Image: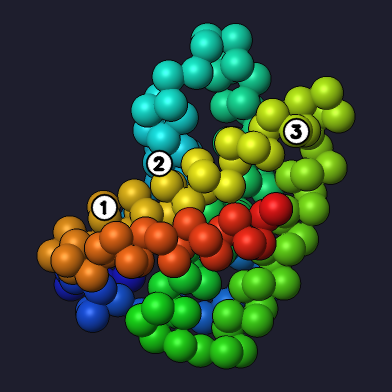
Amino acid sequence: LSEEMETEKNIESCSFTGFKANELTQLPRHLDAERIYLFILKTHNFDKRVFKTWKTHFLSEASIALLHDCFWWWFLHKFKPDRENQDCLFDRISESYVTLFMSIPLRRKDAFFQVYPDCLAQAIYATFQEAFPESSKLFNDEFKEDLGNNIFLWLS
């Protein structure tokens, strides 16, 4: 990213650099997926033991990939449609979800996946707000509802 891009805070100036099969596309303004997930997890006030256990799953490679790829899929879907890149992202989203699903112990699966879609949607929304504060008027209730519905549709 250029210096100019690094400081841009509106969505109009952002563009998707293209899908790379073996590499996640960085979040805008160098936002960190782990920090975003930790912020979301802390807002839920989970019991310490639950937090510690779920933190491992939220910060797993598959979950981090889900945040990156879902963010960029939604960015393209809402603001700069690009069917080819969206299809590639969606395929990897599917693979990452299966990897995450298979990594969760059976005894925790139901509880984890009752919470995960909501947390992922919140993390994606928080990424938009943090990345593009000058475009926050675009991230209204309809945007939130569409995002949440889409993530729940994919992950349930």
| Scheme of colours in the image | rainbow
Which numbered mark, 2 or 3, is in the foreground of this view? 3
Which numbered mark, 3 or 1, is in the foreground of this view? 3
Q: Residue at x 52, y 61 (%)?
A: 149
Does residue 155 appear to the left or right of 135 in the view shown?
Answer: right
| Residue at the spot of label 1 | 130
| Residue at the spot of label 2 | 36
Res 3 seen here: no
Give whichever of 24, 153 is nearer the camera.
Answer: 153
Give percent across and percent down for residue 33.
46, 46
Q: Amino acid at mark 3?
A: Asp
**In the structure shown, which secondary structural element does the residue marked by tag 1 occupy?**
helix
Which tag, 1 or 2, sits closer to the chain's start?
Answer: 2
Give percent across and percent down for residue 150.
55, 64
Res 19 seen here: yes
CA gap between label 2 and label 3 equals 23 Å
- Circle 1/circle 2 CB separation < 8 Å: yes
Give percent across and percent down for residue 81.
46, 88
Query: Hey, which quadrant is residue 115 in on the image?
Result: top right
- Circle 3/circle 1 CB separation < 8 Å: no
What's the mark number on residue 110?
3
Give whichever of 72, 24 is nearer the camera.
Answer: 72
Which tag, 2 or 3, sits closer to the chain's start?
Answer: 2
Q: Amino acid at mark 2?
A: Ile
Q: Residue at x 40, y 78 (%)?
A: 78
- Circle 2/circle 3 CB separation < 8 Å: no
Query: Hey, which quadrant is residue 55 in on the image?
Result: top right
